[in-house]
Image: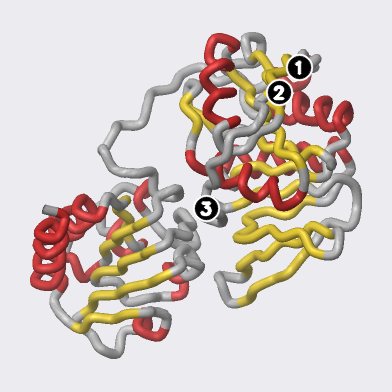
Amino acid sequence: MSEVLVLVDHVDGSVRKPTYELLAIAKRIGEPSAVFIGGSAQAGAVAEAVKAYGAEKVYVVDDAEIKGYLVAPKAEALQQLAEKTSPAAILIPSSAEGKEIAGRLAIKLASGLITDAVDVTFEGGEIRTTQSVFAGNFTVDAKVTKGTPIITVKPNAAAPEEGAAAGAVEEFAATISEAAKTAQIVASQPRQATGRPELTEAAIVVSGGRGTGGDFTAVEALADALGAAVGASRAAVDSGWKPHTFQVGQTGKTVSPQLYVANGISGAIQHRAGMQTSKTIVAVNKDEEAPIFELVDFGVVGDLHSVLPAVAAEIEKRKG
């Protein structure tokens, strides 16, 4: 069975949920092999984490010499590992960094690239993907026809599957060119913690729009009751009620949670493009003619400032 390389998405050695989802997808195709690019001191903990979700091998690329540079060194390391292992596919989280790594890697390997897949299957000996394209108006079934399939997969495209595997650790020494080190990060600061899940990874997202009038108190209370992330429409962001990092839509972040709750959001195509691949969609809006109701699984015509506190209270009651 051929290896499937999965690039580990982590923050200082703390493995993020999309990695476990990619390992579940990799099991459909072949033998999952995790690729950790990070500090050698963190490798042991990372290996333990990923082998619990099916990683048969863990390739460790020490980033001592490339830490602080942009994505080019990571693409070169993956290229050299792929040339050594001849994998059946390479799976990468569909983040901004992940897609840039994938694009550079595709050129280096002269291989086909599929980005933002919402599903990956293995049928008749072929790896096939599903994408939602053109602002969500079309669903595309695609496959790579040249080289090693390189696929970036959106968060929540698969459920993590626990299942201990060998997790054999193998150090891989990549040779990074000087050309790949020409862009360097000179300063950074950690994102302020909110205590809520990251927007693109969350299983539940509760968003607010123009109908909030700038008061996100009810939206945030419901999100906290559900253990959800908070999102916002472009109208709310343009009004200065939330920073751009909260924006869901064509010019913001694309999310595919199990549950998406849209509150006071009309449902313009710009917003729909960022959330309509959600598994279940609920909307609360005073306007019964709002376009968002054409998309939802369950709609509530009412004032979000009255509806959401009642829902949050009932959730807390049942949790108690």
The percent coordinates of residue 111 (x first, y second) are: 86, 46
Does dot 3 land on a helix, a strand or a loop? loop
In the visual, does 174 lie left or right of 158?
right
The percent coordinates of residue 95 (x first, y second) are: 56, 44
Does dot 1 land on a helix, a strand or a loop? loop
Q: Which residue is mark 2?
A: 59
Figure colour scheme: secondary structure
Please tell me the numbered disc located at residue 159.
3
Does dot 2 land on a helix, a strand or a loop? strand
User: In the rendered image of this protein, does residue 202 appear above or below residue 176?
Assistant: below
Of residue 103 and residue 174, the one placed in the foreground of this image is 174
| Within-10-Å neighbours for mark 3: few <14, some 14–19, many 20+ | some
Q: CA distance from mark 2 to mark 1?
A: 6 Å
**Can you say which quadrant of the picture contains the N terminus?**
top right
Q: Earlier in the sequence, mark 2 or mark 1?
A: 2
Please tell me the numbered disc located at residue 172.
1
Number of numbered discs visible in the structure rendering: 3
Q: Are marks 2 and 1 in contact (CB under 8 Å)?
A: yes
- Place residue 38 in its image quadrant: top right
Q: Are marks 1 and 3 in contact (CB under 8 Å)?
A: no
User: In the rendered image of this protein, does residue 220 appear above or below residue 87?
Assistant: below
Callout 3 amino acid: Ala
Q: CA distance from mark 1 to mark 3?
A: 29 Å
The percent coordinates of residue 186 (x first, y second) are: 51, 17
